[in-house]
Amino acid sequence: MKNKQKTLFSFALILAFAILVLGVLTDSTAITNFDSTISQSTAKVMTPTNTAFFTVVADLGSPLVVITLTVLLAGYVFYKKDHFLACWIILLQFGGSALTEIIKMTIARPRPSHQIIADTGFSFPSGHTFCTTIFVICLLMVVLPKIPVDNRYYMIIPACTWIIIVAFSRFYLRDHYPSDVVASLLLATGFWLCLEGYRDRLHQAATAFLTRRQARALPSKN
């Protein structure tokens, strides 16, 4: 996908997210009906076994765990001498997480009642879903270039499945409304694509800056 296409697609995703925000702020009937329909359908598959499973999923997909994994991934990439990508991974996760928290506090949507696993803070959007999506994207950025193109779906399909499972766990456990989760998927993907459109230019600028600094430093060592 070319940079212009990434920018246009990110704009479409962020626009869809903005429409969801407007719907939540105005208590849109469409949003309410969507949340109610999905929640009622989810209630039909609630069992003690499923609840135990999705509780573990929620723990593994928590922002604390996922951000820690992101830092470890960035550390590995830094160790492998790709310093720019390591910094890029940190920027995506920490910058995105900060953006999510700002939106949460601005929208201030209360969490659903009757939570199975009690959680604190506001509901919109889902931090678990956002952080997990960004981490999976970062992991794919590191791993996919090392895998032959024809075999990449072996990595992409499980990665996307994990995002879906974490996202589902959030409204299964009634910690979020389904619209919170959809909003996070839109925001995370749009945020990544928006920045991704500028990654090559920033990489070139950083490389040129470091090259100039090294060139100026060389005479002082002689």
Image (tube, rainbow, N blue to C red):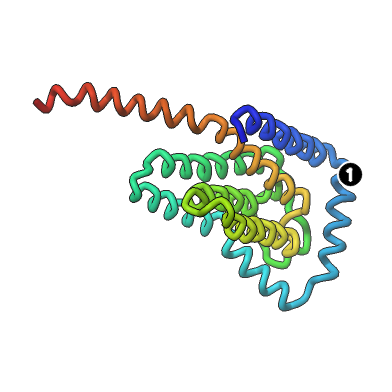
Left or right placement of residue 143 versus residue 208 in this view: right
Q: Residue at x 59, y 30 (%)?
A: 3
Quadrant where the C terminus sits is top left
Q: Nearer the viewer, residue 174 or 109?
A: 174
Give the answer, above or below, for where 41 lies relative to 78: below
x and y, in percent, of residue 102 in the image: 61, 39
Q: Residue at x 52, y 45 (%)?
A: 93
x and y, in percent, of residue 154 in the image: 60, 60
Left or right placement of residue 66 versus residue 20 in this view: left
Residue 119 in view in this figure: no
- Amino acid type, callout 1: Ala
Give the answer, above or below, for where 69 lies relative to 197: below
Secondary structure under tag 1 reads: helix
Mark 1: few/some/many CA within 10 Å (<14, 14-19, 20+): few
Q: Nearer the viewer, residue 155 or 98?
A: 155
Q: Residue at x 60, y 43 (%)?
A: 101
Q: Nearer the viewer, residue 154 or 83?
A: 154
Quadrant of the image occupied by residue 204? top left
x and y, in percent, of residue 164 in the image: 69, 57
Outermost residue to the left: 222
Q: Residue at x 67, y 68 (%)?
A: 54
Left or right placement of residue 143 versus residue 217 in this view: right
Task: Report how many numbered discs are placed on residues in the image.
Answer: 1
Quadrant where the N terminus sits is top right
Give the answer, above or below, for where 25 lies relative to 52: above
Q: Which residue is mark 1?
A: 30
Give the answer, above or below, for where 83 lies relative to 4: below
Residue 102 in view in this figure: yes
Outermost residue to the bottom: 49
x and y, in percent, of residue 38 in the image: 84, 57
